[in-house]
Amino acid sequence: MSIIAFIIVGILAGFIARAIMPGRQSMSFVATALLGMLGSFVGGFLASLISRERAFDLHAAGLIGSVIGALLVLLMLSAVGRRRRLV
């Protein structure tokens, strides 16, 4: 996958994950893009463990995996944020 496509899919996945996740996430555009790109990497890596396809290929299931990965990253970030507020 090219870098440009990776960034575009990351931005889309970040925005979709933020829309799905309940609660308020105060993130900038760059943070949302980084969230989506990290989620895209996590989703692609998890999908490559299950299937025999390469982790960085672009296909329709890749966007779904990217959103799921971004949701997982967002969940971990919110859990860390909650833990910091309690201490």
Image (tube, rainbow, N blue to C red):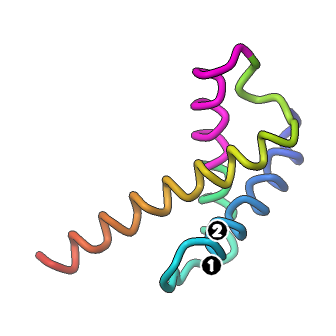
Q: Position of residue 75 (x, y in %)?
A: 43, 62
- Please tell me whether mark 1 sits on a helix, a strand or a loop: loop
For label 1, the crowd category at 10 Å Cα-Cα, with few meaning under 14, some 14 to 19 and many 20 or more, is few
Q: Which residue is mark 2?
A: 32
Q: Nearest the camera: 26 or 43?
A: 43
Q: Position of residue 80 (x, y in %)?
A: 30, 64
From the image, which quarter does the C terminus lie in? bottom left
Residue visible at 81% across and 52% down?
9
Q: Are marks 2 and 1 in contact (CB under 8 Å)?
A: yes
Residue visible at 57% across and 31% down?
46
Image quadrant assignment for residue 30:
bottom right
Residue visible at 60% across and 22% down?
50
Residue 28's disc is 1
Q: Nearest the camera: 80 or 22?
A: 22
Prevalent SS, magenta region:
helix
Residue visible at 55% across and 58% down?
71
Residue extent of the magenta highlight: 39-52
Q: Position of residue 79 (x, y in %)?
A: 32, 65
**Amino acid found under the numbered disc labelled 2:** Thr
